[in-house]
Image (tube, rainbow, N blue to C red):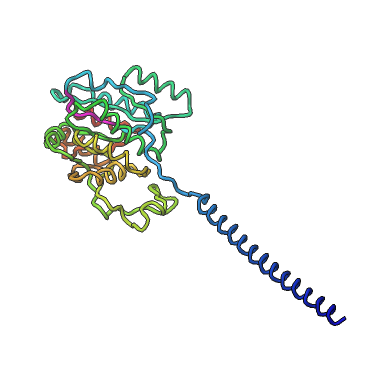
């Protein structure tokens, strides 16, 4: 009886030890399984996390043209200046006035040609009008991007691309807005140097670390906190985009730099700050005293002194016909 009892106790202890061992083993396996699952989830989360900002580049780099008047510069062997104008789709009158000024023989023997850069519209009637205007004047270049304020960088890069491809016979380039008046008498007289210089920008110069980066959501030139994080001022020398003169050799270099420069919507700083910073030896030559940012000053100077006005360029009030009145005064 004692033997039987002892045998039963031994058997029970053995089973208990086995059960305990199996329990510990199961707990250990469960713990390891949980760790494996958690680790797997961590790895999955690491590879499926949301990407809030994605690097993008000007879309015109890989896009064709909607309208391309590629023969503008081929009709003459040599062009003194090719003017690329940032214009809005519905500014028909402004473009008409500028054609009168730039295509005139008034500046002979210097030859000026102009291209008007624009994007797309959802308005089919407006698009038809643009296509007809292009057919008549053959000076419009239109890209596959919406014609909006935040696409001015795309418009500028498209201009660099077009000149690189179709207008290398120009002596120099001018980039302007369609509310600007240009005193080509002074320009041809005083800026002859740009024809012979290399890697040269002539403009209303803005020094590095002097132009405040606007961070307010309602600011005109609002810049997101993730762009130039940690900077209060733009870190490169640049130009105000009212008018910029570019030596012809620099245009393809700027376009090449755009191929490796992520998109930044503030076009003046992208085109004439970020891109030149990637090219060794670029010179920003300031003509700030010869640039008017006030349309009254522009009008008064040209009205009084005509083509002897010290201004090279000045902003106008084009919707008040002041540009035409200035041209009439100079042309007398």
Q: Quadrant of residue 256?
A: top left
Residue 190 visible in rendering: no
112 vs 15: above or below: above
Q: Which of 297 and 131 lies nearest the eye of the viewer?
A: 131
Rendering coords of residue 133 (x, y %): 36, 20
Rendering coords of residue 329 (x, y %): 21, 29
Residue 14 visible in rendering: yes
50 vs 59: above or below: below
219 sits left or right of 310 in the view = right
303 vs 32: above or below: above
Query: Which quarter of the image is occupied by the C terminus?
Result: top left
Q: Quadrant of residue 19?
A: bottom right
- Per the picture, the main secondary structure of the magenta-coloured stretch is strand
Residue found farthest to the right: 1
Residue 62 is covered by the magenta coloring? no
Rendering coords of residue 273 (x, y %): 27, 46
Q: Which of 180 and 160 lies nearest the eye of the viewer?
A: 160
Rendering coords of residue 165 (x, y %): 27, 27
Query: Which quarter of the image is occupied by the N terminus?
Result: bottom right
305 sits left or right of 325 in the view = left
**Picture residue at 48% right of the left edge, 24% below the top:** 124
**Picture residue at 28% right of the left edge, 53% below the top:** 235
Residue stretch rendered in magenta on the structure: 78-84
């Amino acid at each position: 009886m004692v033997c039987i009892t002892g045998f039963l106790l031994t058997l029970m202890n053995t089973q208990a030890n086995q059960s305990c061992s199996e329990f510990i083993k199961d707990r250990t396996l469960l713990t390891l399984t949980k760790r494996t699952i958690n680790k797997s989830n961590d790895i999955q989360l690491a590879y499926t996390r949301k990407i809030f900002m994605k690097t993008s580049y000007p879309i015109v780099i890989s896009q064709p043209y909607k309208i391309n008047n590629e023969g503008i510069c081929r009709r003459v062997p040599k062009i003194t200046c090719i003017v690329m104008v940032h214009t809005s789709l519905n500014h028909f009158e402004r473009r008409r006035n500028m054609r009168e000024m730039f295509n005139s023989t008034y500046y002979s023997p210097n030859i000026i040609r102009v291209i008007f850069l624009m994007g797309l519209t959802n308005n089919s009637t407006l698009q038809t009008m643009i296509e007809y205007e292009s057919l008549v004047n053959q000076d419009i270049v239109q890209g596959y991007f919406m014609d909006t304020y935040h696409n001015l960088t795309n418009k500028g890069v498209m201009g660099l691309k077009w000149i690189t491809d179709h207008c290398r016979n120009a002596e120099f380039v001018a980039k302007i807005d369609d509310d600007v008046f240009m005193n080509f008498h002074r320009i041809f007289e005083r800026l002859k140097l740009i024809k012979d210089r290399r890697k040269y920008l002539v403009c209303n110069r803005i020094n590095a670390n002097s132009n405040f980066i606007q961070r307010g959501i309602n600011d005109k030139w609002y810049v997101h906190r993730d762009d130039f994080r940690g900077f209060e001022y733009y870190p490169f020398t640049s130009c105000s985009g009212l008018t910029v003169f570019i030596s012809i050799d620099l245009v393809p270099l700027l376009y090449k730099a755009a191929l490796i420069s992520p998109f930044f919507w503030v076009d003046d700083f992208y085109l004439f700050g970020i891109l030149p910073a990637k090219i060794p030896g670029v010179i920003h030559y300031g003509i700030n005293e010869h640039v008017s940012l006030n349309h009254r000053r522009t009008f008064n100077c040209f009205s009084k002194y005509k083509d002897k006005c010290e201004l090279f360029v000045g902003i106008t009030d084009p919707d008040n016909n002041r540009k035409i009145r200035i041209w009439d005064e100079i042309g007398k």
